[in-house]
Each structure stands twice: as C-alpha cells, then as structure tokens.
Image (cartoon, helix red, strand yellow):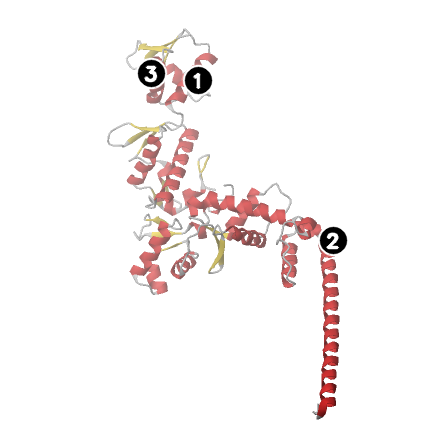
C-alpha cells in the first residue's frame, strides 16, 4: 500500500486496518464455528458408531483395539473417566478396571517365582484362565491398556520391552541396560552363563557377575548348578514361564 | 504333563533351577514350599512312609532334564518338613526320614474312627491286624508304616484310650481299646 501524506492519509490507513481486522475476525469465527460443528458431528457419529457396535467392542478384542486406535487418533480417551459417557455407553471402563485388578492379583501371586517380572504372554494366558467364566475375550492389547491405567497408582507397574518380548514389571526395581541385555539373551534358551555373557556381549567377567548377582538378589533369576558341564546357569522364570513348561493345567 | 505312574508332576519339576538350592532367601522359601508340597502329595498318593536320603527316590531326580537333587538339597527339603511336624528323622545322621502325610495326631484320630466304625470298643486286636486285617482294607490304615502306627497308638495309650500289651508272638503287640 502506498503511503500518502496528511491526516486524511492516516485516517484512510486506520480505516483500512479496521476493515481488515473485522474481516479477519469474521473468517476466524466462521472457521471455529465450522470446526465446532464438525467436531459435534464427529462426536455424535462416534457415539452412534460406538452404540451401534457396542457388542462388537465389548466382545471382539481386535475390534476393540481398532476402536481404541481410532479414538486415540482424534484425541479421545474412552477410559479417561469412568463417569464419562463412553464408560456409560460401553461399560468398558469397568472392564479395564476389572482386568487391572486381576493383573495385580496375578503379579502378586507369581512374584515369588519370577521376582515381579512376568512375560506379557504368560500374564495374558493366566488372566484368561482366571476369567474363564466371563464372556469377553481379553487380548494382549487389553492387558497393556489396563496396565497403563495402573500406572496412575504409582505402584511401579510398567511394561518394558526386552528384545522381542514385552515384560510386565510389578516391583519398583529399575533394570539397567546390562540387566535388559542379559534378559534379552536369556530369551533364547531360558538361561545364560557368565561365559556366554563374556563371549556374546564382550563383557568382563566382573561386569557379568555383578549384573547377574543383582538379578539374582532381586529374585528375577535362579541358579542351576546341575548341568553336566559344571557351569552355573542363570535361569529367568520371566522368559521361560514355568506354568507353561509342563502343560497348561496349573 | 510328565507323570510318575499315576502321579501328575507339577511344572516346576521340569525347571532345572529347582534342583539347585537357591541362595536368595525369598526364592529359596518358595522353592522349599513347592518341594514340601510335592513330597507330601507324592508320598500320600503312593502310600510312601519312609524316604532314604541315599537311596533312589523318584522325586529326587528328573531324567527328562538331567537334574537330580544334591544330598544337601534333599536334607534341606526334608528338614523343612520335619520342622513342621510333617516328617521325622529316624537316625541322627539324617539318612532316613519318616514322612507324616497325616500328622501323628491325625493318625490317632483315624484309629479312633476305625475303632468306632468297626465296633472294636472294649475288644482286643493286634497291631498287625490293624495294618493288614480285613477291617482296614480300603482305609488309610491299610499297610500303614509300623513305626507311625506305634507312635499313634502310644499317643492314644497316653490319653487312656487303649492299652498296649505284649502279645503271644514276639513281634506283635496286643491292643485293648477302651470304650
């Protein structure tokens, strides 16, 4: 815009600015309204969808997981509040709280065996046994969701990824990088030896023994001196899942 | 599921570290607990009353995973049973162990019921008859270990429920039950 001299020029400029501002505000308002309308439509559509597929969501774990994904993408957390319309609509809040409680029970019951570190798969299969009578199937995805809700209790429930597996930790012990590497290595055969750690991870024996001792003390590992070669083996119940060793009726 | 005869073995029996005494206290407690239950359960279903620590005992080794319990571990598990009154050492060297899957007190109760069921009050029988006679057939008393039976009978004698006296043959004693 070319500047013109004099008071008239200044006034014209101010007028023009006001006009622009007004126009801008209008456009913004229209956009917000549009957005609000879209959101409302979306929300009601989502509600309709949820209502229509209520049974699928409750009964089919794969469907449920996809529904959760969809909600997450648009920033809706159906579990955020038990009082929310989602919970009322679907009753899935209760579902996850129920699983959460059962997960805590399983973790406590198996703690003496695994030191508070349990394979997600094993946890799920124990959970399914526990819920045999109930109608809804439970997937690993459901377990993860329930565990993520347990985090707010500050009780140290956490899912850690070690190698290809997911482990659920129910004790506050922090595992460092060395410990994770050991457990990852143990996934192969269920156990490791000091030799193996030296060879595969190029650690000194001091480092290997130190890390193994910690894992032993925390109850994550068990020693086995019974093999023919006379080398001590360190077994990890969290990766070998004792309950599935000899069949599935325990 | 691995079995020994008709006995179902628990999963931990196939997990090698359970055959090594665990150094960490919590882990060891759980280990000892599982072994105690297994030994009692096995002895009860197989009617075993005596375990010799130096003899072959089906639970002391698992050929499938090539593991067996050391003498130290055997002694530790049995000692845990002894401390709960569920077993007794028969010698100072801890080489022989009596397994009490019924405690002595429970065996005594079983005898009392046996007497009632068979109307033996005020009558006389022998120790051998209790173990092998037709009345005990099908009950826990059938084939019960003599040492255990005598222990339970003495407990009852002490309570005045019966009198033990020397029988005609040297190796058998007579029992007179009170009413």
Task: Name the residue that disc number 1 marks.
Answer: B136
Comparing B145 with B154, the one in front is B154
Are the residues tagged 2 and 3 within 8 Å (C-beta)?
no
Q: Callout 1: helix, strand or loop?
A: helix
Q: How much space separates mark 1 and mark 2, taking CA atoms?
A: 68 Å
**To which chain does the residue with label 1 belong?**
B
Classed neighbour count for the residue bearing mark 2: other residues with Cα under 10 Å, few (<14), some (14–19), many (≥20)? few
Q: Quadrant of residue A17?
A: bottom right
Does residue A34 lie above or below A59 as drawn?
Answer: below
Relative horizontal placement of residue A204, taking residue A39 as reference (left or right): left
Mark number, residue A14: none
**Going by the image, does B79 lie left or right of A240?**
left
- Residue beneath label 2, please? A52
Label 2 sits on a secondary structure element that is helix
Of callouts 3 and 1, which one flags the residue occurring earlier in the amino acid sequence? 1
**Dot 2 and dot 3 within a common chain:** no
Mark on residue B154?
A: 3
């Amino acid at each position: 815009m070319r500047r013109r001299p004099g008071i008239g020029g200044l006034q014209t400029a101010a007028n023009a600015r006001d006009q622009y501002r007004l126009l801008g505000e209008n456009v913004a308002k229209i956009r917000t309204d549009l957005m609000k309308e879209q959101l409302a439509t979306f929300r009601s559509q989502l509600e309709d969808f949820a209502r229509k597929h209520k049974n699928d969501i409750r009964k089919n774990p794969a469907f449920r997981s996809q529904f959760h994904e969809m909600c997450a993408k648009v920033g809706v957390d159906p579990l955020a509040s038990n009082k929310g319309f989602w919970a009322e609509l679907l009753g899935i809040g209760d579902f996850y709280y129920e699983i959460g409680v059962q997960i805590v029970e399983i973790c406590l019951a198996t703690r003496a065996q695994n030191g508070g570190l349990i394979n997600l798969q094993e946890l799920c299969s124990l959970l399914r046994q526990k819920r045999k009578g109930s109608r809804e199937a439970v997937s690993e995805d459901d377990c993860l969701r329930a565990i993520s809700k347990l985090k707010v209790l500050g009780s140290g429930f956490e899912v850690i990824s070690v190698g290809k597996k997911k482990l659920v930790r129910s004790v506050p012990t922090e595992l460092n990088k060395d410990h994770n590497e050991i457990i990852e290595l143990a996934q192969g055969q269920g156990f490791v030896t000091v030799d193996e750690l030296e060879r595969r991870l190029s650690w000194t024996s001091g480092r290997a023994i130190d890390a193994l001792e910690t894992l032993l003390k925390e109850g994550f590992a068990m020693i086995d001196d019974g093999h023919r070669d006379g080398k001590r083996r360190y077994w990890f119940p969290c990766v070998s899942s004792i309950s599935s060793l000899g069949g599935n009726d325990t | 599921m691995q079995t020994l005869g008709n006995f179902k073995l628990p999963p931990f029996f196939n997990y090698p570290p359970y055959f090594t005494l665990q150094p960490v206290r919590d882990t060891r407690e759980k280990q000892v607990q599982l072994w105690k239950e297994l030994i009692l359960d096995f002895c009860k279903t197989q009617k075993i009353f005596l375990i010799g620590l130096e003899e072959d005992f089906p639970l002391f080794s698992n050929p499938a995973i090539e593991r067996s319990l050391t003498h130290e571990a055997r002694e530790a598990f049995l000692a845990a049973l002894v401390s709960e009154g569920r077993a007794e050492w028969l010698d100072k060297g801890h080489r022989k162990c009596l397994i009490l899957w019924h405690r002595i007190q429970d065996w005594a109760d079983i005898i009392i019921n046996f007497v009632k069921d068979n109307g033996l009050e005020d009558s006389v029988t022998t120790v051998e008859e209790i173990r092998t006679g037709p009345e005990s057939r099908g009950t826990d008393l059938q084939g019960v270990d003599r040492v255990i039976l005598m222990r339970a009978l003495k407990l009852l004698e002490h309570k005045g429920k019966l009198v033990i006296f020397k029988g005609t043959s040297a190796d058998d004693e007579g029992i007179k039950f009170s009413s």
